[in-house]
Amino acid sequence: MQMSADPSTVRGSIFGFQAFSVHDGPGIRTTVFFKGCPLKCLWCHNPEGISGKPLLSFTRNRCIECGTCEQLCPDVHQIVQGRHTLDRTACRLCRRCVDACPAGALEVVGRGMSAGEVVADLLRDQRYYAASGGGITISGGEPLIQIEFAEAILRLLKPAGIHCAVETCGAVPFSAFDRIAPLTDLFLYDVKETDPDRHLAYTGAELAPILTNLRRLRTLGADLIIRCPIVPTLNDRAAHIQALAALSLEMDRPLEFLPYHPLGASKSERMGTPPQTAYGQADSAKTASWRDAARAMGARVIES
Amino acid sequence: MTERTTMLKNHIQALGDAGVRKTTFFPLIAQSLKDTLGEATRIRRAKAFAFLLDQAGQVVFPHELVTGSVLGTWPLDPDVPSFDLLLSSADQAVRDYIAVKSGQAAVDKSRIAIGYKKNVSFSTQRWAVMARDHYDASIRFLDMQEIIRVLSDKYRHDTTVEAFEIGRVIERHFEYDYGEENMRLIGELPWEAANHLDLNYDKLVRRGFGSLLQEVDQLAAGAAPEKEAFYAAARITLVAAIRFIERYAGTLEQERETADPARAQELGQMAAICRRIASEKPETFREALQLVWMTHVIANIAGGCALSFARFDQYLRPFYEKDLQDGRMSRKEASELMACVFLKVNEPKMRTVQSLCLGGVRPDGTDGASDLTKCCIETIRALRLPYPNVSVRIDSEVSPAWLLDESVQTIQVGFGMPMILNDQLWVPNLVKLGYPVEIARDYYNMGCVEIMIQGRQANWSGAGGVSFVQLILDVMEQSRLGKIHVPDFDAFMRHYLLAMSETIARSHAQGLEKLSQMRQNHYDPFASVLIDDCLEKGIDMFQGGAALPAQIAIGGSGLGTAADSLSAIRTFVYNRKQLSLDELSVVLKQNFAGNESLRAMLFSQTPAYGNDLDEADDLAKTIFDAYSEGVFSCNEDETARFVNVLFSYNGHVTSGEVTGATPNGRLKGKPLSDCIGPSQGKDVHGPTKLLNSVLKLDFSKVTGAFALNVKINPSWAQKPSGKIILSSLIHAYLQDGGPQMQFNMQRVEDLKAAQIHPEQNRDIVVRIAGYCEYFVNLDHQLQNEIISRTAHELAN
Ligand code: SF4
């Protein structure tokens, strides 16, 4: 594919920015979240990022049941016995209800932006990046399914000397990595499960291509951190922890465990995405035990 | 902490719990003033000071190595009634107040002011929202809080009184009565004591009281007749101070007789030190520290408050280095000595807020941070106390990296200390204010965050003030009454800025008036000895004797609330045209009654200051820049320096209580935004966005006191990686010209637990506006405000 002459005009779809992101990669970072993902993890904590399209989000505890939205758009909004109900199938995302809602309960999540606009936003926090060893992170969703957009943003940031990280689930054609590896300082590479059957069951995708991409990316000399969300009862098994440690040793790159937080469950309710089970949360002793187990095998484990 | 300092800390805590204290100050001063009727005011002032010191009790704490306490003038009151009696008397006071206010009763002074020194007043502010402010109450602070809670609840539905009035009536009800005659004598003098300044401890430790006394005598010998009284008064107070310290030596010797051998030896050393430094110049670190502390205690006994230790690590450095070099003292011993002093700053009835400033550049521009600086920071970190209120000055070009590093490690502990001050901003700005650069480099934070110059200024004072929020409501009211026409937002801003400049001009005039009043009859002969140039000129510090002009603050308030309110007006009245300005005015007057959804809309959809949104930040900037320029330009003559100040102390809560509903959806009575920060809970994108917003303000003409509270989440800040993150936030903020910053790190659960079980959670220190305090010492309203802002931070 041909890169357009001016990367700043390349457009893509995102669902937000997170300034002062201090848990994803080193230092103070700003993360931009791309829309769309090939995986469907049971525990996804950004369910609004799975679909490539914008969504109407509704936050019940903000709603004061005033009925303003119902008047504007009775097909979508109805107050039934004093309780707001929502039918998203009829929603055309016209945003009129969003602007009119007095409580800020309605929101459209997801919007188109040009790479130039994204970069301008990311650079607003530039003063904090260098000193903290931070920079920007492109995340999602899966950013590399909008490879044009991702590449354009990285091209614009490269000359500014900004540290760029890309968070990926790895389930994309390797050509995507080929294109951005030279522009990326650090990959946050997620391996969600090391058992192939379970991987398929938990994420809806095959494990093998993800591991193949990981190994190839490493042979390109890219710097990366292997990351895995640890979800109690699903993948908090000793065997999985050990397999991750082995992978980390094989790649000669550090490992990071991301303790599960049941945020996605309430978010999926807000976004109208398929309901999620809320899994338990591991306490700090438990999360330390994963790190200890991996370290015992000689893996380097980081905590951010 | 060492075993000794732990025991001393416990002892001081126990003193705080021991009961209600009633001062001997008023009766003693009044007694002396009766005896000196007819003499010159400043002589009476000096004699009363001497009498007070001579009569003051002297208390020695177990375990301490540096002695001196104000508690000698604050004995326990044995006659405090039971809680039930206190409650019923307070209830009666509230009922009387309601009766008077609703016109049902004539003002029956004997009834309403039973036994207390003030009568019913309908002025609009409460005066105490924390234990330390409540110097002089005949009730335990926690009991009073409980009574306020019970009675506010009881009279919740009474429409004649607002909640804050109940609090105020109760606070006044529990003021001690020292007798009308006594208070009249004191008020007529009047008794003013050096406050909100530093005494020049640098000069003190270089000279000692004896040498200062000699100088007074020499100057007096050749003085013009009109200066004689000044020197005579100075002499009386100096001699009294020397006598007081010598008497302390005696007190220590007495204690020694009954002490165990180990303690007896310590008491003997302390007595010898006191005997020597009473008039001699100190030779060792310990002697210098003892002299500083004793002088501090004397000034506090005399009624001073917010007395600062100023640049503590500068004037004690020669003693510290010499003792270490000569092997007379170890670093650990130095730390323990300082710990004794810092702990004692927290003894009951010490008059807050006492600050201490570390680091920064020296008058010649070179780095002033030393091993003593480091030792101080380490000591403070281990003690985790609310006082002294410590600042670390950082010059990003000159200060060594370890200075920021040590500061950050201390911030990570999570008790709000130290605040960071930016040398690269303050030094040039003080030069703009008219001070030579070597003098500007000697700045420090007085009290909370007020910027002053060490050793050379009379007290900081305030005049008038600019409520950014009230001015908005005023413009709206003018429009509603048809007095002005406000067709568009530009017109609104024109009226607003005009009103602001008129308010500044009024405050300026008030300040000059206040200054001239002060010069008519205010004297502090003791403090005048320790403020540069007073002695040489033979003029009291209150009379213009100080080397630098008096600093008068014209404080601004409510920046965030005001910016958001203007933003709401622009968005909803002028852009979206959802309602007219006058309609909004009416809705606000009714406190949004029946307009809940409008309020929700204003609250949730108004672009708010603190999120790096240009469309809200530009309004904060307009307000801020106009205000800071307006005050800056009040300095055409040399009599005083008018300084701009955005620092709220407790004012964001107390003025919030009396401010009506605001266009940003804030309800009547709720707190205003504090200092230069955003509206509570409205900065929702984290500290970098907050700092970006703040850095849009033009700080090139700020001169007074500017605080920014950054609420941080322990989940990242207390991790090892939190250190580099905090350092880079501070570094970036200083680099880009931010004047001051301070951090608050708390857990909501802990704060809530402390509200329920204050006795079990007394160690939690929170950062409020420019100062820190034990959470349990705060009034319920202020506690709630802190909990809500903390909860908000943790949710993001
Ligand atoms: S407009 Fe907003 S607050 Fe009103 S019913 Fe609809 S979602 Fe709820």
Image (cartoon, coloured by chain):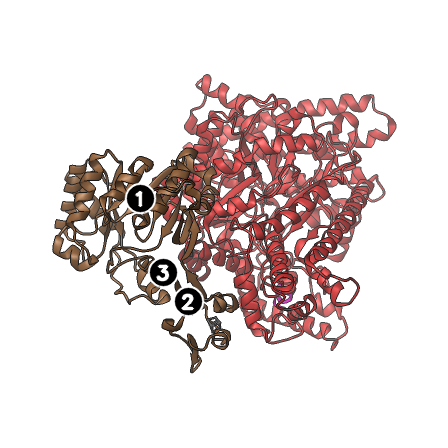
Chain colours: A brown, B red
Q: Do we see residue A12 in this rendering? A: yes
Residue B277 vs residue A243: left or right? Answer: right
Q: Do we see residue B1 in this rendering? A: no
Alpha carbon distance from label 2 to label 1: 41 Å
Q: Is residue B101 magenta?
A: no
Q: Amino acid at mark 2?
A: Thr
Q: Counting residues from the N terminus, which is met first, the one under dot 2 or under dot 1?
A: 1
Q: Residue at x 65, y 75 (%)?
A: B159
Residue under mark 2: which chain is it in? A
What secondary structure is found at the residue carrying circle 1? loop
Disc 1 and disc 3 on one polypeptide chain: yes
Residue B270 vs residue B199: left or right? Answer: left
Q: Position of residue B559 (x, y in %)?
A: 62, 51
> What numbered label is drawn on residue A1?
1
Q: Which residue does the numbered mark 2 point to in the structure image?
A: A59
Residue B221 vs residue A125: left or right? Answer: right
Which mark is nearer the camera, 1 or 3? 1
> What numbered label is drawn on residue A53?
3
Disc 3 and disc 2 on one polypeptide chain: yes
Q: Which residues are magenta?
A: B162-167
The C terminus of chain B lies in which quarter of the figure? bottom left
Q: Would you say the residues marked 2 and 1 are in contact, meaning their CB atoms lie under 8 Å apart?
A: no
